[in-house]
Image (tube, rainbow, N blue to C red):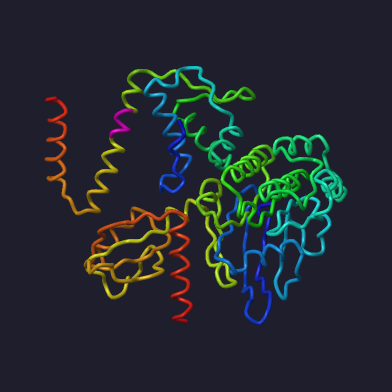
Amino acid sequence: MFDRIDPRSPTPLYEQIAGRIRVAVAAGELTEGHHLPSVRQLAATLRVNPATVVQAYRELEREGFVELKHGAGTFVRGISEERKKGERIRGAAELVQEMLSEAARLGVDGQDLRTALDRELGSVSHE
Amino acid sequence: MSDAIKTSGLWYRAGPEFELHDVSMSVPAGSVYGFLGPNGSGKTTTIRLLLGLHRVDRGDISLLDREVPKAMPEILQRTGYVPERPHLYPSLTVSEAVRYHGAFYEKWDESWTDELFDRFSLPPNQRVGKLSKGETGKLLMALALAQRPELLVLDEPTEGLDPVVRRDIMSALLDYVSEQGATVLISSHLVHELERFCNWVGLMDQGRLISELPMEQFKNGIKRLRIIDPPNHYDDSPFEILLREPVNGGVPGEMILVQGWHADMAEYFGGVGASLREVVDLDLEDGFVEMLRAFRVQATEG
């Protein structure tokens, strides 16, 4: 699940780790009660700073995705379908933001993007 | 204790060609501090000064809130060190080297040591001089961890080792850090490795500490920006400009290297009649190379 953690990305590592778990929960890959690896295990496996893992887990706890049970570990919480949908929309928004910043870099304007997007989506739905 | 290592105004002349120049560094307690710099920039010299292996010409050093070199015996009890070159007697066997080394530490823990040596699968009866490079690297790290230090000073601990050994060593180190909350100062040329787990970065060049920042500020605050219609002077900019140069390939505008950048600052350019066309993200290696380049340009221009 963490294969694509990219330390070189400008997105902080804790955010990448939290993002992977969030997506896995929204997609139903991780279900309620799933026991996440301990901070120590995950830090050693990913070779990241333990503080980074703590920060990721705290963020997920604040958002209600996981529960930190003292002495027992970190567990995935049950998430409503509505919330899962919200997460997918948030994921889509992130993809679009990436696309927009890339487009700005290349000097492609919004109208061209919209046209291209409609065409691509159209070809998907006609298939 | 807020800083596990603190130096102020460190000067040290190491020869006619090289001098440490006013080095003031702070390694926060509990941080993993990546110490970067090209060969000959003064990293090893600084580390040797920290450990009392050289005497400073001027300046103060404290480790774990104790003064160097006055409190050195106490500091060394609490500090694990992996030197750039192995410092073990080659004719001792691994287990003899462990006993010899352990004798210097009051709190040496046999069972923890056995656990570490098992983890690294080090052959106890092999002579130290006959160990492979990878095994030597593991032995040095195991010895540094075995004393259960509060502070680890690691001078290129994975230099020249294969990726499998490197991962083993780094995982063991991070495991220890998780468990003990120890502070780590680590120098390495393997910048991508440091990028994974360091949360502070100190950058040296030509005997000076040219930058010291939390990793996140280093990576997110240092950017290359492409500017169209650049002004003659960037007056009152909310960020610091380190370098200005034309864009490659005859593309209009100029590239500037900035520090202290934040996305909100894009508005500034409209106010000086310019426009921001592109923000180039830099990873740690790019940031490191760009900072050095800027430093050297400024040094030549006086």
The residue under the point 25% across, 67% down is B249
Residue B207 relative to residue B124: left or right? left
Magenta stretch, main secondary structure class: helix
Foreground: B58 or B102?
B102
Q: Which x, y percent locates residue B65? A: 74, 56
Furthest-front residue in this view: B130
Left of B295 or right of it: where is B7?
Answer: right
Residue lying at 46% horizontally and 46% vertically, measured from the top left: A7
A34 is higher (above) or lower (below) than B65: above
Q: Residue B174 at x, y = what percent?
A: 62, 41
Confirm whether the magenta stretch covers residue A50: no
* Left or right: B71, with A53 as reference point: right
User: Residue sitting at 14 percent across and 25 percent down?
Assistant: A127
The answer to whether B262 appears left or right of B119 in the picture is left
Which one is nearer the viewer's eye here, A68 or B197? B197
* x and y, in percent, of residue B189 in the image: 55, 57
Residue B4 sits in which quadrant? bottom right
Q: Residue at x 75, y 50 (%)?
A: B130
Asked if residue B44 is positioned above or below residue B17 in the image, the reply reads: above
Counting labels gives 0
Q: Position of residue A25 (x, y in %)?
A: 41, 24
Kindly indicate the quadrant of the structure image that contains residue B258: bottom left
Tell me: residue B172, above or below residue B44.
above
The magenta segment? A88-92
